[in-house]
Amino acid sequence: MRILERWLKQYIDFDIPPDALAERLTMLGLEFESVRRLDAPYNGFVVGEVLAKERHPNADRLSVCTVGIGRETLQIVCGGPNVAQGQKVPVGLIGATVPRNQHDPSGAPFVLARVTIRGVESSGMICSEYELHMGSDAGGIMVLDRDARPGDPLAAYFGLDDTAFDLEITPNRPDWLSHIGVAREIAILTHGRVRLPRMNLRESAEPAARHLSVTVEERENCPRFAARMIRDVKIGPSPRWMQNALRNAGLRPRNNVVDITNYVMYECGQPLHAFDHALLRGGAIVVRGARAGTHFTTLDGKEHVLPGGTVMVCDAEREVSVAGVMGGANSEISDATTDVVLEAACWNPASIRRTAKALGISSDASQRFERGADPNGIRFALDRAAQLVTEIAGGTLLKGLIDLYPKKVRERVVPLRFSRVNRVLGTRLKKPEIVAGLSLIGITQASAKGDAAKFRVPTYRVDVDREIDLIEEVARVHGYDRIEPGSTATVGYAQQFPTGSRRDDVRTALIGRGYHEAITNSMLSLKRAALGGEKPVEIGNPQNQEMGALRTGLLAGLLETVAKNQNAGNTDLRAFEIGRVFSVDDSGAKHEVENFLEREMVCLVLTGSSAPAHWSSPKREADLFDMKGDIEFLLAEFALDKRRFISYSTSNGLTDSALAIEIQGSYAGYLGQVRRDVLAEFRIEQPVFAAELDIAFLGRSAAKVYVPLPRYPRVRRDVAFTVDAGIPAEDLERTLRGSATELLRSVEVFDVYEGEQLPGGKKSVAFTLEFMSLEKTLTDAEIETEVGRVVAGVGKAHGAVLRSMR
C-alpha cells in the first residue's frame, strides 16, 4: 500500500520529516518497506515550450526545435513525429539522467550530454512518456497541458514533489489501507484531529429508486449493499491533480468516473464500483450465487469459469460483477456512458478470499474485503464519490441512497480493568491518561465503575474485541519506547521442574545426532498421499489439487524437502519431522472420528555424505546401516531394549531393502532405501534412506541412572561362526546374549563374509564379546567357561560351527 505525504496532509496537520515520521509510525505498529522522494528521478527535467520547429537539413525524420524553458532558450534536435510549434513538452537538460532509453533493449538509463546530430548541435532532449517511465508510448513525444508553465520543474507539474511511503499492511488492520486510516495514526503522534472532506450533496427531486432496484439474495455473504445514481454524466479525463495522485499511488488513470472510485478507495478504504446504468438489463441489481460452470469476462479482459456459489452482482438477466473482486466487461464505464450507478457494499471476508483464490485474482478491492471492510463507512464513501462525480463529470444526483442494511453492525463494547493495564505493561498510568489515550484513536469510554470501564470501539477497528486488545492499544498510544524494561520472577520450591514431552525428547535426541527439523504441509495431492499404500483421507473442498488429501505418512513431505535442497545445491542432508498422519481404516475398529485413523509419527531421511566433509577422512556415502544406527540410537535413548529389525517385502510401500521395526513384539515402523520410482516422482537423483516410527511406542525417555566407573577390567574375545547364509546376524546376537550370564557386557558384529573359502549357501559372522565382573577380576578359566557356553548355545540353536576364536 502506497501512502503519499501530500495526500495525508489533506486530513491531518503535521510537520515531521518523512524518515522521522516512518520511524515513529513503526513504533505504532506500521511496517514500512520504503520511504522515497518521487521527484528524485526527475532532477534536471523542466517544462518547455516549442517556440519554433524546422526541418533538419541533413535528416528527413528529425526536426530542429527552439524550446523555451523560462528565461532560457535551447536548440534541441527531436525525432518525435508529433512535435509541433506551440506545444508544452517535457525537456531533459544537460546532465539529467533519462530513466529509460528506448533505443536500448534493456531500457537502461543514460545521462544527457551536449551532442551534435548530423551536423546540428542539440542541447537537451524532448522526452516521450516511455523515456520518462510514465507510460508505454514510445512513438512520439509527450505533450503536456496548455496551462503548463515553461521553466517549472517537471516533477512539480506531475505532482511528484512528494514523498511516498510504501507500507506492508498486516491482515488485522484493514483501516490502514487508506490515507484517512494512516492519518488517524499520525493523530496519535500530534494529538491532532483528523479532518474529513466536507460534503454538500445536491440531490434532484427525482428518486433513484424509480430507475434502479436492488435485491440481495446472499444475505450472509452481503450484510450491506448500497447504491446511488447520477444521470447525464460526461465521461472524460480526470483533472490533473487527481491523475497525479493516482499515478503517484501506483494506479493508472482511466476516466473521471473510474478514477473517482479509485481515489475514494485510497482515501477512506472502501472499494466502490461504477456501472453503466444503460447496460444493467431491467434496471436491476441482484446479488446472488453463480451457477457452476458459468463463463464470465472481467474488466481485465480475462474469461473465467465460475465455481458454483460464487457470489456475483447481477442485473435482471446476467452476471455483471464478481462481488468484491472485479467488475465485468459487460457493464463497464465507457465514453458513451451517461447514467452512472455507484455501488458500495460489505462482503463476507471468507467468501471473498475463496472467490479470489479460485479465480486467481488479487485486486485492490479483494485485498480490502478479505481483511474486513467497515460496513458503516459505506455511506461516507458513496456520498464522497457522488459529490466528486457531480463536481468533475457533471450530471444530476438522483434523490436518495438505496441501502439494504437489514442487520446493522453496532460499535463493540469492550471491558477494561485499569489495574490490569499497568500489570500487563509494567506502567503506572492513571485512569485519565488511559481514557485520553484511547480517545485519540476513536475508542471512547461508555461507562465506568471503580477499577473497570467499558469502551466503544469503532467498527473500522476489526482487530479490537478483547480486553488484551485494548491494553495493546494503550501501549501503542503511550509508546512502546516509553515502557521501561523490567522483570519479575517467582520460585516455587515445593514444585518439581516440569518434564518435557515425548515429542521434545525425540527432537532433542535427533538434533544431537545431526538432524535438522522440517515442518511440511499436512495436505498433499491425492497421488502423493497414496504412495505409501494406505488409503488417504480426501478433503471435501480443497483449495487446489496439490492439497486434495491428508498425508498418510511424513515421508512424502520430507522428500519434497530433499528435492528443494537438491535443487539448491545441498546434496548432503539429514532431516526429520514430527507430526500427525491420517488414513482411512476399513477394519471396523472404533476411532474418535468415523473410520479415520490418526497417529503421531517421526520420520527421518538421510541422503548424501554419511558425515560432514573433513580433510582428515575420505567422503563416504550414507547407506542403510547409517540409518539403522540412528534408529538404534533413538530407541536406546528411550531404553527400549526389546526391539527387533525384521526384513520384509514392501512391494506396495515407499522403500526397498526394508526392515520392519518391532518394539516389544508389535510393529512400530520401518526403515529402508526409498524406491527409485518414488524418487523419480520427486525428481531426486541420488539415493535416499528413510525411517518412520510411531511415537506412541517410544514412551518417555528413561530417567538417567548414574553408576560408579567399573573397578575391574573388561576382557575381549573375538569369535567367528559359519552359518547358513539366510540366518540374520541379529538372531545370532540374540542367542549369544541369551546363552551367557551377566558377565557378558556387550556383543558387536565386526565382520560378515561370504566367498570362495566357504561352502555354498554359507557365510561367516564374527562377533566381539566383552566380559566383565563388577566384583572381581575374571580368571582365564571363567572366561573360557563363558565363551564355551555361548558357542554351544549358538551351535545348538542355529547349527553354527565355530570357525575361529581369539
Image (spheres, rainbow, N blue to C red):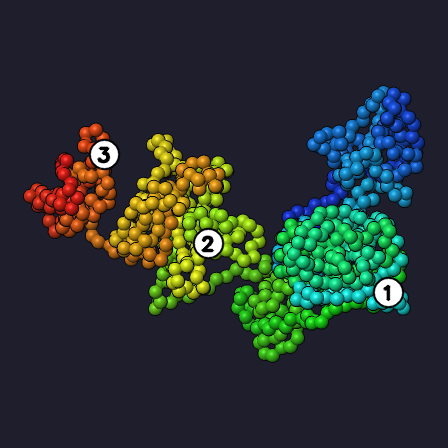
Give percent across and percent down for residue 481.
Answer: 59, 58
Taking the spot 82% from the left edge, 32% from the top edge, the residue there is: 125
Q: Which residue is mark 2?
A: 536
Estimate the x, y position of residue 516 in percent, counting from the top left.
Answer: 42, 46
How many other residues sit within 10 Å of disc 1, few (<14), some (14-19) or many (≥20)? many
For marks 3 and 2 on the same chain, the one whose residue lies earlier in the sequence: 2
Tell me if 698 is positioned left or right of 168 in this view: left
Quadrant housing residue 98: top right
Query: Mark 1 or mark 2: which is in front?
Result: 2
Image x and y of residue 51, in percent: 92, 34
Amino acid at pointer 3: Tyr
Q: Residue furthest bottom?
A: 449
* C-alpha gap between disc 1 and disc 2: 59 Å
SS for tag 3? strand
- The structure residue drawn at horizontal position 13% and vertical position 38%, both measured from the top left corner, is 802
Give the amino acid at mark 2.
Pro
Q: Secondary structure at mark 1?
A: strand
Can you tell which mark lies on residue 398?
1
Residue 23 visible at all: no
Tag 1: residue type? Leu
Q: Residue at x 33, y 53 (%)?
A: 668
> Which residue is disc 3 drawn over?
753
Q: Is residue 166 above or below residue 370?
A: above
Depth check, front residue: 68 or 3 = 3
